Structure formats: C-alpha cells, structure tokens
Amino acid sequence: MSTFSERLAARVAAVGSSTCVGLDPHLERIPGIGADDGPEARARVVETFCLSAIEAVADVVAAVKPQSAFFEVLGAPGVAALQEVVAAARRAGLFVVLDAKRGDIGSTAEAYARATLDDDGPMGADAVTLSPYLGPESLEPFERRMERGKGVFVLVRTSNPGAAPWQRQHGLAGAVAAWVAARPQGAGAVIGATLSASEARHWRSTLPDSWLLVPGLGAQGAGPEQLAPLLGASGRTLATASRSVLFGAPGSDPGAIRERALAFRSAVASARALSAGPERPPS
C-alpha cells in the first residue's frame, strides 16, 4: 500500500502544483444565504458553493482543505454537507486534508481517528490536522492509520501572535517536530507562512523530508517571498490559500474561483523560483 507521502507526491506530480485550497465557507460571504435562513437551508447553500469550488479547481490544485468548524456550526445539516464535500473532492481526484485540529487521548482520540480518516467512517479524508498539546499518546490512534496510507498534519509552529511563547519558549514546537521528523511517510507539520525568514528556514531544515502544510498565504498576508524559505529541496510543501481564492473581486462564481486558484498556483511557482537550492519533484 502506498504511504501518505507517496500518495500526496503522486497527486502533486499529476497536477503539476503543490497547492491546496482551503474550503472555509464563511456564511456572511457566500451569495444566496438569507438572514432568516435556518441551518438546513444554509447548509444546502454551503454544500452547493463548496461543490462548485471543487469542480472549479480540481485540475488546478493538488488538494483541498475543508475547515470543519464552518460546517459544524450548522449542526447536523452542516456535518452532512461536510461529508458530501469530502466525498466529492475525493471523487474528483483531489487530496483531502480535513482541517479539524483534533487533540485528545485514549478512546476519544481513537473515535476522532475513526471519524476523520477511516474509509468506512463518516469522513474518510486522506489526512487530518491535529493539535498535539496532550502529548504523543494523543497521536497514537492516528499513527496506526498511517499503516493504511492515511496521514496527519500536526501543528508545529503557527504564526498567530500569541503562539511563540507556548510553541517556542516552552519547547512544544521542537518536541512535536521531532515526532514528525521520525515519521516522514505518514506525518507532516503545519508551519505558518508569516514567520520570519530565519525561523522558516529553521523549520524547513529541521524537517527536511517531511511534508509541510503552510497556511497564511493570500488573505493573511504572506506571499512568494515568505513561502520561499519553507520550500527546501524536497518539494514537500503544500501551500494553502483559502479566502483569497474563494472570495474576492469579481465574485465567487466558479469561473472567478478558478482564476484566483490559477493566480495562486502561479504565485507558488514564483516562490519556487525564489527558493534557494535546486528543486526536485516531491518523492
């Protein structure tokens, strides 16, 4: 069976780009949602919007990253919509990273792993984001899924303003990075794109063979110059943009989303041109 890393590399090679579009359906920005609509009506609009976005970008980007919270806020209809969005993305050949940031231990962690990754579970995503604050036992149920070709992206170093004292000064980021580095075929790291260039280079050198999921591009302010230090020679970087692709001028119809996805793809290609060292295809 192919590993998570091999499957993601194959998808990147097939589409010719290591880009990922985050499916963050902000209700206030999606056309067609009325102020008085209930959860079921809103969930139908959200599902239709995301399915249209998937169709628009399926041959342009390597992956999509549905943000679970924006679906869960709609209750059971929203969770049902998320299930259909994940299934549709996989049918379209996209690699699906479920952005759920789960983090617990024991039977609860096992239930989270079954729910998010198992093919006979409700989601069946290719990978899921995890919060490792409770320690390595919170990752063990997900590690067992790596043997079945599934993967995880573990929060290592995020770029929100309050993250540094916890993640760097208290050593959490380094400990988690070591866990990820020991499992390059099944585990990747979330590294924010808006870090300083020196810190970005530090994490890329710490995790030379691991996949990095890099949010923060586009609406959060990072561009090719910030992404370049995170690319490295391995090619194992999945660059992510969400709001800047889904929303913006001239609108959020599938054609406009596709054009913005193509522009994002070009920006990532520019970052590769800026990055130091020879590039090789991800393996």
Image (spheres, rainbow, N blue to C red):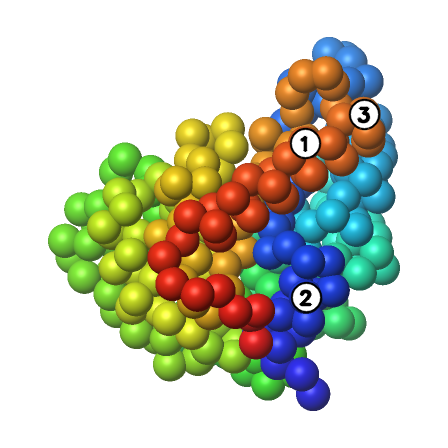
**In the image, what residue type sits under mark 2?**
Ala
Displayed quadrant of residue 97? bottom right
> Residue 13, which numbered label?
2
Q: Secondary structure at mark 3?
A: loop
**In the image, what residue type sits under mark 3?**
Asp
Q: CA distance from mark 1 to mark 3?
A: 11 Å
Tell me if label 2 and label 3 are in contact, CB under 8 Å.
no
- At 68% from the left edge and 17% from the top edge, which residue is drawn? 249
Nearest to the observer: residue 78 or residue 177: 177
Q: Secondary structure at mark 1?
A: helix
Read off the residue under disc 3.
253
Q: Earlier in the sequence, mark 1 or mark 3?
A: 3
Nearest to the observer: residue 87 or residue 255: 255
- At 48% from the left edge and 64% from the top edge, which residue is drawn? 279
Q: CA distance from mark 2 to mark 1?
A: 21 Å
> Residue 260, which numbered label?
1
Nearest to the observer: residue 80 or residue 62: 62
Q: CA distance from mark 2 to mark 3?
A: 28 Å
